[in-house]
Amino acid sequence: MNKKTNPEIKILPDKPALAAEAAKRFVLLAQTAVEQNGRFTVALSGGSTPRALHELLAQTPLRDQVAWEKVIIFWGDERFVPPDDADSSYLMARETLLDHVPIPSRNIHRVPTVGITPETAAQQYTSTLQSVCGESVPRLDLILLGMGPDGHTASLFPGHPEVVNPSEKLVAAVTNSPKPPPLRLTFTYKLINAAKNVIFLVAGADKAEMVKSVLGEETAVGFPPPAKLVQPSNGKLLWLLDKSAAQQLPNQ
Ligand code: 6PG
């Protein structure tokens, strides 16, 4: 049954507090998933905001509160660059988190980006997700997302085919990302909205206008921003905002 729940919105004083809240939620969700299902499947996000979250998870005390051997890592989107490229979200996650926790390398499912076309990579990653999760439409325990000032999330950008006319694909290739680099892979809404938990991490005054149009009451003129279409059909949606990003919401 599709039950779209209203998002939970939590506003934190600043970026460090945002990261701390996100880390707390990550640990709680990981402990619950491992307790109930013996593992925790999570898709990390690219961008700069998740770095502070990763760094908190990579150090005590939180580091020791997660059963890393039972954590399965994917990426909700990835820049189509080699894994040692400065733009790689995989590299950022390795440097800030994965190289500092006892997670088996077999649990880390990097998006294939070398010696392959984006379209083939999207098909391959779809198969990986399906076989690791054992479901044709995987219901990940947690998908972490960011949002750009233009309302993009993962690599779902305004006006792009997967936003204007979402397909049945789980992972799509993007060839014209307005946020460099242009070549990317991204989870689609079909995969994102199947998740048990989706958490947005959004900070900074430059996003306040878009936060208002995504979370505010008024109906946005024109096509909704990509982030607004993230509405888990049978899962929880949490927006973690810092005060700067939330400043245009009512009662701020
Ligand atoms: C990426 C991300 C992208 C990011 C937003 C926010 O590959 O960059 O997938 O969607 O989450 O652009 O980025 P910041 O966290 O740097 O503001």
Image (cartoon, grey):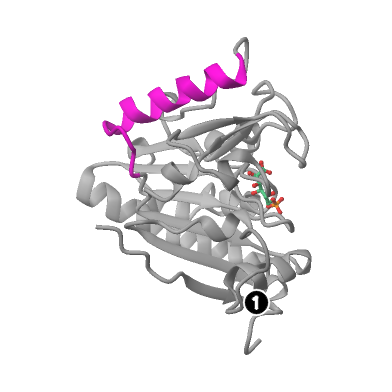
Front position in the image: 78 or 216: 216
Residue 59 located within the stretch drawn in magenta: no
Camera sees residue 102: no
Residue 92 point in image, percent of width and height = 65, 37
**Callout 1 crowding tier (Cα within 10 Å): few <14, some 14–19, many ≥20:** few
Determine whether 216 is above or below 104 in the image: below
Which residue in the rendered view is the most extreme toward the top?
Answer: 115
The residue under the point 52% across, 61% down is 22
Front position in the image: 26 or 103: 26
Which residue in the rendered view is the most extreme toward the bottom?
Answer: 251
Q: How many marks?
A: 1
**Location of mark 1 (residue):** 13
Q: Quadrant of residue 165?
A: top right
Determine whether 197 is above or below 207 in the image: above
Residue type at tag 1: Pro
Determine whether 134 is above or below 162 in the image: above
Provide the major secondary structure of the magenta segment. Answer: helix
* Secondary structure type for disc 1: loop
Front position in the image: 97 or 86: 86
The residue under the point 45% across, 25% down is 105
- On screen, residue 224 versus residue 26, left or right, reads right
Magenta-drawn segment: 117-139
Residue 116 point in image, percent of width and height = 59, 12
- On screen, residue 122 versus residue 197, left or right, reads right
